[in-house]
Amino acid sequence: MFVLCYLRFFARLQLKKNKNCKIVGITGSAGKSSTRNAIYCVLKNKYAVKASFGANSESGISLNILGLAMHNYSKLDWLRVMILAPIKLLTNFQKFDYYLVEMGIDSPNSPKNMDFLLSIVQPKMAVFLNANFNHSFAFDSLVQETDPQQRKTQIIKLIAQEKAKLVQSLPKTGFAFLNFDDINIKELSQNLAAESYSFGSDNMCDLQIMDYQTQIQAQAISSQFTFRIQSHYGKLKTKNQNLEIKIKNFFLPKHYAYSFAPAILIGLKAGLSNQEIQAALEKQFTPPLGRASVLQGKNHSLIIDSSYNASSMKDFIELVGQSKKTKGRKLALLGDMRELGEETKQIHEEIALLAAKSFDQVFLLGKEMQRYAQPIIDQNGHHPAILFTNAVEAGLKIANLLQANDLILVKGSQNTIFLEEAVKKMLQNEKEAEQVLCRQSPWWLNIKRQTFAK
């Protein structure tokens, strides 16, 4: 804790050098990084923008503000950044108009809670995306309910309450951008001091999500999102009109609309035109590595690489299952979904039943998938599930099974699963791995070597 407070002290001093910059805090259980990327694309052509790429935690935010990064997280590495922190304060004079910062919480307790993050940065603008079961383990002990559905509802509400502290902390001069399709967000944001802007499927939202389509044609994939800018109460200085965003070469489920929506609203508030916002997103937006990437696989197959984490696994499975595909098989490599607490069994079983109906063949990795998902897929799927012991083994064996026009979804938690290493073995050109896959730094590769050796 001393190290975190030490770094926070220098980070707060560093931010004072840009006292007029607008800090945009982004929170939610899923989609923070993609939202940050979308807002960055919209603003960067007109303003100086700093973003917390790869940093959203109690240590990462302070380090990012100072312009520092960890190498291997050893004691010597922590000592290195502690020595460099005051030096950076004296030498780093980067100027920016906006600072986009992801604010991820893992617990209701300090320092992994929102209160600690708010002690580092005090945003004047905030995006609240959603609240779901990610990192629910730390909230388990706070709920005594035994009925599974009621328990799930109560835990998600507690997670939402912790995340809501971000928008509730905004000053009267601040701006909140809120997903009103999330009932908890809508309830927790009723009496904010800040001026608020809503997005969602309802036509009373300031930005309405109208339509969504994904097309798969041979080796090409594109996703199109349609929004309607409303002019309720004169909050947005524009007439009611539609805005279409078409993103090529990424397999984006509908929930990406909730990443583009706040980027559009913030762009409008920043004085950008509809055309500028559209062009920025269509030409420059890319999700972070390991989220919805479309990669060329062996034997003219396609890989949907969403291996970074297990967030929105249901959305990806549903989209692949519903997509029209005339040639080739639909396959999936699914890894454990971690940190779900007492809901682990229920959620894995729900995913298994959906996957059994959506894919011609399902490959599994992890103890939870073996215990809860495999029996359901064996009973309900087109073929019995195939289980692997680690990602490298999975990649090598699946690579030999891929056929022309096959489409394979890869998704799972990162902790000890590391499905990007399976993707690496399936790539048409494995030499591209460092550029197209997540967690390819020397530190991560060493961690994975140690994990797979056990």
Image (cartoon, grey):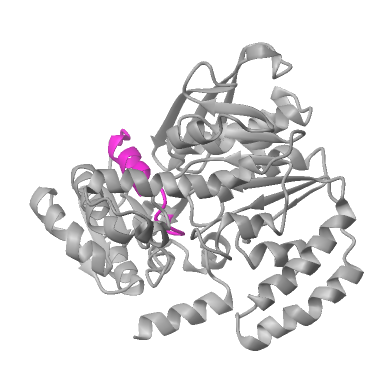
Is 72 displayed left or right of 317 in the figure?
A: right
Front-most of residues 51 and 293 = 51
Q: Residue furthest left?
A: 379
Residue 282 locus on image (x, y percent): 62, 35
Relative to 393, 251 lies left or right? right
117 in magenta? no
Q: Is residue 412 visible?
A: no
Give the residue drawn at x 37%, y 80%: 452
Q: Residue at x 44, y 48 (%)?
A: 158
Identify the image quadrant of residue 86: bottom right
> In x, y percent, where is residue 342?
28, 59
**Residue at left offset 64%, top offset 29%:** 196
Q: Is residue 166 left or right of residue 417?
A: right
* Quarter of the figure that contains the N terminus: bottom right
Q: Is residue 358 shown to the viewer in this render?
A: yes
Name the residue nearer the viewer: 224 or 430. 224
Left of 28 or right of it: where is 452?
left
Give the number of marks.
0
Q: Is residue 318 magenta?
A: yes
- Is 43 placed above or below 304 here? above
Give the magenta-colored segment's residue range: 306-325
Quadrant including the C terminus: bottom left
Image x and y of residue 271, in percent: 79, 27
Relative to 131, residue 136 above or below: below
Instruction: Name the residue at 50% across, 38% down.
Output: 256
How far across and down, in percent of the image, does residue 134 sit?
A: 42, 54
